[in-house]
Image: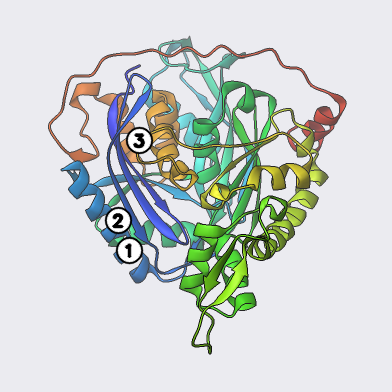
Amino acid sequence: MDTSGMYVGLDIGTTSIKVIVAEYLEGQLNVLGVGNERSAGLSRGVIVDIDKASEAIKRAVKTAEEKASIQIHDVIVGISANMLKIEPVTGMIAIGDQAREITDQDVQDVASAAIIQNLPPEREIINLIPDEFIVDGFDGIKDPRSMVGVRLEMNGMLFTGPKTIVHNTKKAVEQAGLNAQLAVVSPIAQGLSILSDGEQDFGTVLLDLGGGQTTAAVIHDHRLKYAEVDPEGGDYITKDISVVLNTSFENAEKLKRNYGFADSSRASEDNQFPVDVVGQSRPTDISEKYLAEIIEARLQQIFDKLKTQLSATGALSLPGGIVLTGGVAALPGITDLVQDSFDVPVRVSIPDQMGLRHPSFTQALSLVSYRGKMSEVDLLVQSALAGSSQLASQVQQRPQEQEPNVAVDDTSRTKSTQTRTKQPKKRGQGIRKFFSDFFD
């Protein structure tokens, strides 16, 4: 399958909104333009003012358009994992009285059958991801099209979120003059994009340290299995610095970025810098270590709460350890602090694209990468959700006839087929307990 295309990722964060225009070709991302603007209308990762949020999105999109020299129409938008619910679903349809070839429409129909349920009025479906198809009792099928059968079944995972969060996000995108071509639960996109095949397979905790909230997600068997959100993030660290040092929020943010350490043991008592204190005419000198102690105290509080939740699931026994991302992950010493707090292997994921080598850009890049890696079957299944008919039309068109997400001259694409080799699974006693508690 040719997954080549030009896509736009939209990351609506609490502190900043990032737009990345990238071409996905032969499994590689080529970034064409980036927009990065200060957020407005968000609190703790959730849109609370649609008008302000849409204006901030417009500014970020305009910057990306100018840098990429294109006009953006369609975007892939990330949805936060707040109050996310994950549940297995099954659908079954009769192909006909006599065996015939399974078509695209059959895949859409069996996906629609899987989501026929009475959802609470306050929840909305975000993603539907197929695990396997079953044709006349033969299971483990990833793409049933062109096979012959009389009965088609699908097992998959359904991801639902609060209707307020989903609606406000899509409404802000629409009000900014854009089409949310695809909405993706943020940890799903990040897990597929920044974790290695082994980390996705054997199990890893993905810790997204954002400005408005901190998200801990468990990825196993290449699927998001669990997500926990703590409504504290980098902004809380900045507020702590502002209150303790009696300085403005803007000054506190600069201090955090320029002099901050996550691990106070790595900071120096001798290295001092001036701080503008409210009510004083002259700055006060503060040591690097004192600032680090303020930062570490808030981070430790966040980690302690998340550790309690993750320990209850047994997730910290998974061999992949913890992978850090998000803006706060750029703080020096963060790896040591997380390793001491959770007692597992830790690494920071940093994009390798030129100009984007900062963990805060991971989410926007992940959205583009996720869309590029989606198979035709994934698109058909996702199109079964209301308002996703555009995805199905892309499967039915030849790759070179697809309408791109941006107004730009089409170029020739090279067909590439990627094959992934799955590593043998090895599970210890702790991991088996984790599976029995959550995944069975």
Furthest-right residue in this view: 429
Q: Earlier in the sequence, mark 2 or mark 3?
A: 2
Residue 121 in view (yes/no) = no
Q: Earlier in the sequence, mark 1 or mark 3?
A: 1
Give me the residue at 62% from left, 56% from top.
83
Q: Tell me: residue 424, above or below residue 345.
A: above
Give me the residue at 38% from left, 36% from top.
368
User: Label 3: how many residues lie within 10 Å, few (<14), some (14-19) or many (20+)?
Assistant: few
Q: Position of residue 48 (x, y in %)?
A: 46, 70
Q: Which-is-in-front pick, marks 2 and 3?
A: 3
Residue hosting label 2: 60
Q: Amino acid at mark 2?
A: Ala
Q: Position of residue 104 (x, y in %)?
A: 37, 23
Q: Amino acid at mark 1?
A: Ala
User: Label 2: how many residues lie within 10 Å, few (<14), some (14-19) or many (20+)?
Assistant: many
Residue hosting label 1: 56
Residue 354's tag is 3
For label 3, the SS is loop
For label 2, the SS is helix
Proximity of marks 2 and 1: CB atoms separated by less than 8 Å = yes
Residue 377 in view (yes/no) = yes
Q: Position of residue 12 (x, y in %)?
A: 42, 55
Furthest-left residue in this view: 409
Give me the residue at 62% from left, 21% from top.
198
Q: Which-is-in-front pick, marks 1 and 3?
A: 3
**In the displayed structure, does residue 423 sit left or right of residue 43?**
right
Q: CA distance from mark 1 to mark 3?
A: 25 Å
